Image: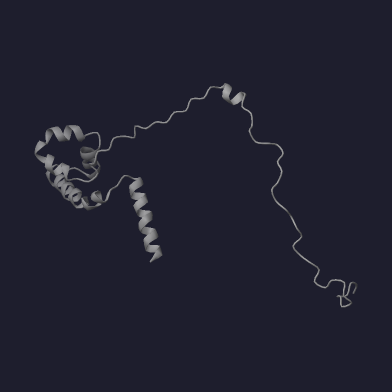
Amino acid sequence: MNKIVIIGISLLILLQGANIHFKDLVEMGELMEHYQFHTEEYGDNFVVFVSKHYGELKVSHSQKHQEEQKDHEKLPFQHQQAPCAQHLVFVLGSDNFIHSYSEIPLASKGNFHYKISYSHIWGDNPFQPPKHA
């Protein structure tokens, strides 16, 4: 079950990164029907079809075929998004890098205490392990 959830979340992130919405996946049937209409009516192959609906021929195709406008609105990947208008710019003068000084102290006192954590098991008793073999 964990693997299914992980795969599902990974696919969701992948599709959102590619700007593909769930609505686009549902509308894929409309895309195939409209492609078949273009194949039968105009003899278009898939590359020309994509160019007419998503590429450089989109404007001329929309102007010539106003009667298909309601079908074009049902096609997937038609959502409009404004490009990201947030541009962050940091301007630093060249002297900021030349005259910069480090704020890191060179010597610091440690706040720790070290104590030997082992003790002699046998001590100084007469029962000690042999020292020489």
> Residue drawn 65% across and 36% down?
104
**Quadrant location, the C terminus:** bottom right
Nearest the viewer among 61 and 90 is: 90
Nearest the viewer among 49 and 62 is: 62
Quarter location, residue 127: bottom right
Place of residue 116 in the rendered image (x, y in percent of width and height, measured from the top left): 76, 60
Residue 29 falls left or right of residue 127: left
Place of residue 105 in the rendered image (x, y in percent of width and height, measured from the top left): 68, 36
> Residue drawn 13% across and 44% down?
71
Q: Is residue 42 above or below residue 56?
A: below
How many marks the image carries: the answer is 0
Nearest the viewer among 113 and 67 is: 113
* In the image, farthest residue toward the right: 132
> Residue drawn 81% across and 68% down?
120
The coloring applied to the image is one colour
> Residue drawn 12% across and 33% down?
64
Place of residue 31 in the rendered image (x, y in percent of width and height, measured from the top left): 20, 48
Place of residue 26 in the rendered image (x, y in percent of width and height, measured from the top left): 22, 53
Nearest the viewer among 50 and 79 is: 79
* In the image, farthest residue toward the bottom: 127
Q: Is residue 121 above or below residue 50?
A: below
Residue 67 falls left or right of residue 84: left
Q: Is residue 101 above or below residue 110?
A: above
**Quadrant location, the N terminus:** bottom left
Residue 97 falls left or right of residue 33: right
